[in-house]
Every structure is written in C-alpha cells, then in structure tokens.
Amino acid sequence: PENDVTEALQHFGYSIADHFCGFVLKARSPSCGVGTTPVADHRGELVGTTDGEFSHIVAQRFPCAPRTDESGLQSAQDIDNFLLRVHLYRHWRKQPSMALAYDWRAQLIPLGEQITRGTHHWLETLAAHSP
C-alpha cells in the first residue's frame, strides 16, 4: 500500500480509553480483522488468517472485552450474543470475580445453545482473568 498507517494504528490502539466494553471491527482488514485477516507467504499464496494489527492490540489491551466484526453479526442471535457479552463484561469490570462469571454461566444454560453460542467459552475467559 502507498500509505502505511501501521504506526498510527499502533499509537491509537495503545491510547484507547479504558471505558470501552466491546469492539466491532472490519472483517478481513489488515488492521481490524478479528481472526479473518488473510496471511500470505512470500509467493502471495494464502497460508492462513490472523488478527489485523489494530485488532491484535485491542486484544492485548482488553483480553476479555468482546470483539467481533460484521461477519460475526449476521443474525439477530449473533447480535444478541454480542450485546449479552458486552453487558456482562461491563458489569464484570466493576468487580472481576470468577464466581460471578461461573454464576452467569449457570444462569445462561437454560437459555439454550442458540442464545448463548460462544458465550460459555467467553465466560471461561472472564473467569480465568478474575483475581
């Protein structure tokens, strides 16, 4: 690319205020992809996918904050799950607690897989980052 914005993205990523409780980024973007940024070898052959530069910094700074991109918000259920994670993360940040994360998990089980798809694993991440 003609305009390399890597340094600016890094600076911005490290300067984001701590009050954010979730991130919606751009799929397949070199800067913002959430596990969807294409990685090519020296011949230009696709060898895998990874996070974009900015997305990677966000994940480092906010390891428990929900991150997604537009491909992760395709259905009403996807949106509900993301917003549920943002809501729970906001409350968890006020008082991080492993017990709280596991209590939420137990309360969500009766809602079924469609409502909580991916949220159970995410709650395990919260519990792991609790004091």
Image: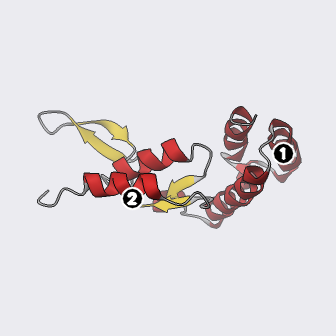
Q: Nearer the viewer, residue 8 or 33?
A: 8
Left or right of 123, for residue 110: right
Instruction: For residue 28, say whether it is visible.
Output: no
| 117 or 37: nearer the viewer | 37
Q: Residue at x 35, y 48 (%)?
A: 53
Amino acid marked by disc 2: Phe
Q: Give the total of numbered labels.
A: 2
State the residue position of label 2. 12
Determine the residue positioned at 67% across, 59% down.
Answer: 86
At mark 1, the secondary structure is helix
With respect to residue 46, does 4 lie above or below? below
- Element assignment for label 2: helix
* Residue 23 makes an appearance in the image: yes
Residue that lies at the very extreme toward the bottom in this rendered image: 76
Q: What's under tag 1, amino acid-wise?
A: Ile
Q: How is the image coloured?
A: secondary structure
Q: CA distance from mark 1 to mark 2?
A: 38 Å
The tag on residue 109 is 1
Q: Residue at 57% across / 43% down in the picture?
A: 63
Callout 2 environment at 10 Å: few (<14), some (14 to 19), or many (20+)?
Answer: some
Nearer to me, 31 or 8: 8
Residue 128, percent from left and from top: 70, 32
Of the image marks 1 and 2, the number of the one nearer the N terminus: 2
**Which quadrant of the figure contains the N terminus?**
bottom left
Question: Looking at the picture, does residue 46 appear above or below residue 36?
Answer: above
Q: Is residue 70 left or right of residue 28?
A: right
